[in-house]
Structures are given as C-alpha cells and as structure tokens.
Image: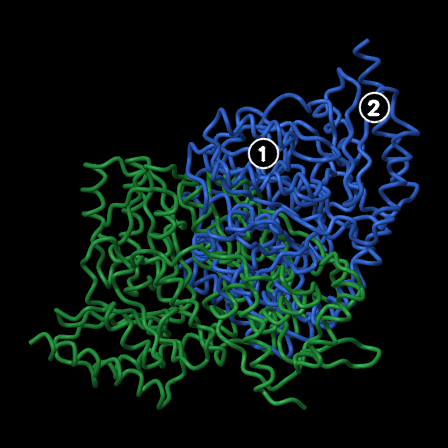
Chain colours: A blue, B green
Amino acid sequence: MLSTDTRNNARNNARKTTANNTTDPLYRQVARELIADIEAGVYPVGHKVPSVRRLSKTREVSISTVSQAYSWLEDQGWLMARPQSGYYVRACFSPVPREQVADALPPASQGEAPAEFTKAGLITDMLGQINRSSQINLGAAIPAPEVLPLRQLQTHINKVSRFYTAAVLDYQFSPGLEALRRQMAARMRDVGVRCLASDIIITNGCAEALTLCLRATMRAGDLLAVESPCYYGVLQVAGLLGLKIIEIPTDPQTGISVEALQLALEQWPVKMVAVNSRYSNPTGSVIPQDNQKMLLRLAEQYDIGIIEDDVYGELGYPGTAGDQPFNTVLKTFDRDGRVLYCSSFSKTLSAGLRVGWCIPGRWYRQVCEQQTFTTFSAPSLSQYAVSSYLQNGQYDRHLRQLRPKMAEYTRCMLDAVHRYFPPGTKVTEPRGGFILWLALPPPVDATELYHAAARQSVAIVPGGLFSNTGHFDHCIRINTSLPWNKDIDRALQTLATLTAKQLDNAS
Amino acid sequence: MLSTDTRNNARNNARKTTANNTTDPLYRQVARELIADIEAGVYPVGHKVPSVRRLSKTREVSISTVSQAYSWLEDQGWLMARPQSGYYVRACFSPVPREQVADALPPASQGEAPAEFTKAGLITDMLGQINRSSQINLGAAIPAPEVLPLRQLQTHINKVSRFYTAAVLDYQFSPGLEALRRQMAARMRDVGVRCLASDIIITNGCAEALTLCLRATMRAGDLLAVESPCYYGVLQVAGLLGLKIIEIPTDPQTGISVEALQLALEQWPVKMVAVNSRYSNPTGSVIPQDNQKMLLRLAEQYDIGIIEDDVYGELGYPGTAGDQPFNTVLKTFDRDGRVLYCSSFSKTLSAGLRVGWCIPGRWYRQVCEQQTFTTFSAPSLSQYAVSSYLQNGQYDRHLRQLRPKMAEYTRCMLDAVHRYFPPGTKVTEPRGGFILWLALPPPVDATELYHAAARQSVAIVPGGLFSNTGHFDHCIRINTSLPWNKDIDRALQTLATLTAKQLDNAS
C-alpha cells in the first residue's frame, strides 16, 4: 500500500496543473476530475467508481484513455481494482475540505452567502442541525422517538407496501386517499366538526396545509392578522407571499384577544386571520369556547376567513375534565365554510411520514388546485400506512399513553426552569402540547443566547422568530417532548448559566 | 332482521323532522345526526360508531341520552350491538347521495361550483379520474405498474423502515437525506454535470422542484419564457404566481428555437426561461448539444436564468448511439450556476414515493428556504427507500430493461395512430419518454374530444392545456407507457372514431 505522501503529491500535482489542462494528456485530465470527485466525497471511500465503459461514454473519450486514467489512479493509490467487479475508492486518505477542489468544480455553483443575517436563514440553519444526534434538541418541536409507536408504524408500512401496489407506485392525487379522508371525517366528530370525506384534503403535513390555505385565500399585499407571538412558519410563508401582517395581542392562557382583533378589523382591511386554537405554538394558549364563538361571529360580521392551526390539539394533558378538556375548535362553530382547519400527525405519530390534512370549507377547490400544481399529492405510502394504522383503533390508545407522558416531561422541564433560571424569568404553564415559552429578564438577547447555546450543543428557538415586532427578542421557546434525563437537566443548567452570564455582562 | 322499508321510513322521518329539531327529544336529534353520518358514508357499513361514552363527551349529552339514541337506532335497523365491542353500522341499505343529507350538514361547506370552465379545473378533474381502474389512462403520463420494480421497492421500503428509525419517524429537512444527495451527485456525472451533494435538494417530485425554482427566482409580474407547447404544470404554477408568460416556438425534434428565444430576449425583459432538455413533454423533443451550448451563451449574454426540466431524461430509447444517445443536459454547460436543474424518479421508479431533486445553482439557499417553509422536506421513508434501492445498483439494470419496453409500447401506439386516425393527422416520433403528441386535422376540438372519450372511459389530455395561445386546441397528448393489448387498441380506435365523427359533423 502506498504512503499517503505519494497520494498527497498526486493530489497537489493534480491541483497545480488543473489550470493548464490542455498541456497534459487527456487521461490525466480524466484522472484529475475523478480525484476531485473523490476528494469532494462524491465517490466515498470503499465505493465503486463508474465502469470504464460508462465513463468513456459519458466523458466522450476512448475506452483506452479511461483505462489509462484508472491504472494511473491505481498506481497513485486512489483506486483499487476488484476482479470481475470494477474499480473502488481506496481507503486511508483524509478527504479534504471543499474549497481545495473548487477549481475542479463549476465556480460559485451556490452563489454568495447571504449578505446580512435573515430569520429565514437562522431557521434553515436551526432545522439543519436537528438531524445531528450530538445536539440536545430543545429547539424544533418534534416528539422524541421514544414516545412514538415505531413498531406499529413499521408493521403497517410493511403491510400496505405488500398489499397495495398503489401505495408503492401510484400517485394519490389531491384531495388524497379516500379511506383516510373518511377516517379523518369521523375523527373530526370528536371536536364536534361535522364534515365529510369530500370536505377534507390530505397534505404534506400541517406546514403544507397552512401554506396552501394562505395561497388559496390571499394575494400579495393583502393583510393577514396573526397572534403575537405566533408560529414562525406563518410569518415566513406570509413573507414569501408578500402579505402584510398585523399582529394581535395574544394571552398565554386564552389566546388571541377578541377585543384587540375587533379593534383591528374596525380600522384595517384585514382579509384573513390565522390562529392556533389549542395548545398554541409558542405560548400553549387555548381559546375558550366562548371566545371561539365570538371569533366566528366577528369573522361573519367583517366577512373574513379564519385559518385554524390545531396541530397540537390532540395533546391535551389528562385533567379533571378528562383526556380532552377542550373538545371544540373554531371549525366546530363554522356555519358557512369560512374556517380553514389545518392539522397533521407530525406531533403525535410521525413527522417523517408527512401526513396532515385540512378542511378548507368554501375554498376547497382553490386549495385542491394549489396542491395539484405544487406537490400533486401527499406521499401515497404514508397515506396508506396512516390509514391502516388508524383502522385498527391503535391511535386513540397511543394518544391516551402519549398525553400523560407529555404532561410529565413538560412538568420536569418547568421545574428545572424554576430551579435554574435567574429571578425575573417568566415561563408559561401549558395544559397541552410539548412547548415552553420563556420570557427572560431584559436585557437578555435570545438570538445571542441561541448561538451561545448552539456552541454548547443545546438547540433552542429564539423568541424573535415568532413576531415581526421586537417584543419577544428576550424570549425563547423550548421543546419539552424529551424524556427527562441528566443530559436535559444539564442542558437547562447550561441555558440558565448562559442567561445569567449575559445579565452579568450587562450590569 | 328488519326490512329496508322500515329503515327508509326512519330515514325519511328523520329527514322530515330535521328542520324542527327542537320539537322532539334530544336522543332523537343525536340519532338523526348519526343517520346523516351513516348515509354520508362517514361511518361505512360494518364499521364501528363512536362508543356511548365518547359520543356523550363530544356531543356534551348524558350517557343515558346516547344509550337511548343507540337503542332506537338498533330498533330502526341502523346499528347492531356486538357484546364487549360496541355498536356497528348494519348492512343492507343503499347509501343515498349527499344532497339528501345536506340538511344535516353545514351548508355550502365547499362553496359553489366554479362559474365558468377553467383549465385548472379540467386538470384537477382529469387527475382525479386516474385512480379509477375502469378508465384506460392515455391521459396523465404515469408509467404502468407492470414496468416498475414493485418487489424490489417493497423490499427496500421494509428494510429501511426496519433498520432506520429516522426513516419512519423523523423529518429529513431540506435539502434532504445526505446519502441520497451524494448518490444523485454521482449519477449526475453520467450527463457530465459536476456537482456535489451539497448542491442538491431532494424534493416532493419534479413538480415541487419546478415550483420551488419558479418561486425562488420570480416575482409576480415577472416575465417567464416557455416552450410552445410546454408542460401544463409550468403554465398553471406561473398563473398561481402571477407571472407573465411569453411562448417561444418549439420544434418537435430540436426543442425550443434558439433564434426565436434570442429575438424575444432582445425585445422583452425576460427574467427566466423554462425548458425540457430531453424527451420533452409534450412533443418529445431533445435539445441538440450545440443548441444547449447556444442557450447557455444566450442566458449569459442577457443574464437570465434557466429552469431545466429533465424528468424524462433517463428514458432514451436504445439506439445506435447506445442506451443514452443524448448524454448532456443544459446544466452540463452551466459555468456560473444560472441553470436550475429539476428531475425526479416519478417516471422511472414510482410516482407515489414523491422523490425528485433539483440543483438550483446560485439560487440554492432561496430554494432551500422556499421548501423549508412550505413542505419542510420530502417524505423521509421515501428518501431512505430510494437511497437504499440505488445503493445496490439495481436502478441502472431496471432502466436498461425499461427503455426498450417504452420504445416498444410507444411504437405500437404510433402504428395504431397511423392505422386508425383520419388522414391529415400528424404525430410525433419521440426518441425517448412515453408520450405521443397528435395534431388532429382542423377543425377538430380536442377539449370536446376529451369529454367524448371520457364518456367512453378513455382518458387523454387535450392540447389546449399546453399553451396559453389557442394554437394547440386541435392537439392531444397520449400516454404510451401501457403494455400493448386489445383494450388499448380499442381505446385508440375509439379516439380515431370520435375524431372522424367530429370531422363529419363539421363538413
């Protein structure tokens, strides 16, 4: 086996001469491209590289040129030949960072980095880190795998992929799998919503449902009323659509202020209002039934539509009022199809399956068309799998187990917040869901805290994302869906310490 | 068992008295709502209805009221009780159409039917029919299940759902599963595109890729140049985004006319151009390598971006030039990241998995953010399954089998068109893909033909959808991915007869 030095020489030599390709033989150019690809990780160590015949065809050079290039690469220690199989990337060299091979790649293929800091950039960045197991995810609100019915989902995925060809191969065009829509229609009865399978559209999670509803009902320049604070996704989509935003004061207990909304409706040409009905993101608020009715009356009076996000609705903590203390939603009181109800299974079953649904009322056709021309449909396999899972009634059993767990985990985190965070810290006491909303003592800067925490492998969401005003720049959102353990305890201590440090520096 | 009559009486009686709910006892109202739900198919025959306890909670009435309602429904023959299990919907009655139960449902929950005929409506309608096996689908371009590797996909779906928790439960946030992006980067080498995994974004099929690219690069009012005719989805999305469209003459052999595009660029503020590079939809055109280079030079000269749709690119018919007679795409010659390349596995592997990808060049971040705030990600399970399938090299083997089949099926259909259609019919002779584009002798109206054919269970796509001009109202698109058989032969005869009939009526 050759020493890495030889290879480095080859590599450097390769890079040096890239500039003046034309001067040296064709086989060297072919070889150099392959070195660049190997270094860039396109062909990882141990993986097969294209066959001689194939490369000669795609690169439009003779078989013998490629063979020459490959044996040179073999000599240089980059490739090893396996009889009857082909050439493979040889182990024992350290892949080098991308910029070093940039010269072999189309320049600026990704353009420049964004000039200034953007919230969208921060969110993309934040979500991008989630799949890193090294991090403790108190950021994105995703249920921990431990609390989800993995085995059962696997069973149903295998079952439907075996028995339904369509689940594996065919589209299930908007509005989606009828069996699933029928099941959802029946489930909606639990919150007093009397709709039919033909009123429901299956979506790629609640995110797509909300986006489709905004697209179907609003045009650029229209005015959207939202809670303050509200789910950051709504603000981002609104931004992408060029909507104007008016933020309505929102109570951590009772949700959006009906009085404040009425005041806004009197003064501004609000076209739609977007609200969380139960266990809202980020404050955990629940709109009381009386307020739900008042909101509907307001909507009728001013003839506006309501986009209702109920994605946490199934996660009410067990209490005196039973498993589902709040068993109505805005859609329950919708008399003329002006409420667009959105939800999904991402918070209770699986985020990866990407199955949500919406009941767009009078905008049914518009939402259907929006979906048809953007994503066509939700994934068929997921639709069949969820439908099969619901079929045998395991979902309600699962929810009965999930709710007390979420209550317990949230309680543990809440205690830790009280235990560790500096005086002056305020925190919500949700009655469902798995989110805590902390208001840290000013002048703490949550975005600064976010970056500091990330450096210590703790993810949180800075409050500034939940509003276009600066009102929540001292707040943070914490995901409480993780089974309590020492690491999480330590993570919360870290956050508290970093907060205290900021306060000290300020004073 | 009671006669259906009794039940009908009960039903009619139920409906009659719905108007004056208040007059009769609460248990009757509860019972009537359930009858409405059963008739509407919310609770299908043989399915379980909500437990007494559950309904009493959601309906906020006493246990005894619900019990009373259920035993009345049992007497009326609507429900049957199963000990230790609950109440089930009894068989032996014919579900009635929806309007009959409308009075028990929120009025106008879907709003009115669209006043006038719309292309979007026709497309939604057309796609909605595809899942009906009764139809012969010469419409939507979806490969027939028989030619797809069902067993292998099932194996890989089961494998990844067993071995990767994340495949079942977690998001794979934009840009998507890295292993898959790496595989795609390697595959792109086959068409001479030298990109990295970090240049690729996995999408919900090519449809989402195209939509994200249009959203990331265009604003309402911007001018988009497209082929004439072009894939109808692009025109629809452009419409949804409020883009202006300029159609560029396109040759069924060589694709978009470079000269005509240059002329347009000289006269109009075109911002982007959207093109099919290989085996285009609908004409099957392929842009020759020289034209590809000229298009890139034009784009650089006028500083516009190119959205490249290559979704049929892998389906070149075996010919003298080998399996892949056209082994470059526009992206191959992209020096500064101005080409946004889009493709998917929907035409070669599975449409239901919803896995596509795009290489957005300098707009990478914008496309990523667009996806993050609209669908978050492509389905995780699908991403893992496709990656696992690609891993063991079955894909290329599959393609080698698929291409000659598509060539054969298309040839059969082509012969049938020559055999049956009236003189004056023109038809394309594609070198790849599975689409035929027919220009019928004027004054044939393709939309009329579409409806007439649908009545005889034959689906086609009317040419008018592929342009905002009226130039193709006498054209139709035919999906040729179906293994040849008598039914298809008959379907083509039907189309030919209906065409001839229109001509007779005209003369």
Sort mark 2 into few (<14), some (14-19) or many (20+) by Cα contacts within 10 Å: some
- Secondary structure beneath dot 1 equals strand
Q: Badges 2 and 1: C-beta atoms under 8 Å apart?
A: no
B127 or B113: nearer the eye?
A: B113
Q: CA distance from mark 2 to mark 1?
A: 25 Å
A367 or A441: nearer the eye?
A: A367
Q: Quadrant of residue A73?
A: bottom right
The quadrant of the image that shows the C terminus of chain B is: bottom left
Residue at image position (53%, 39%) is A299
Residue at image position (54%, 78%) is B95
Residue at image position (39%, 69%) is B141
Judge whether B108 appears above or below B76 on screen: above
In the rendered image, residue B380, in percent from the top left (x then y), is placed at 64, 57
B47 or B458: nearer the eye?
A: B47
In the rendered image, residue B368, in percent from the top left (x then y), is placed at 54, 43
Q: Quadrant of residue A306?
A: top right
Asked if one can make out residue B165 in the rendered structure from this viewpoint, the answer is yes
Judge whether B5 appears above or below B394 on screen: below
| A169 displayed left or right of A141 | left
Q: Which residue is mark 1?
A: A226
Identify residue type, mark 2. Answer: Thr
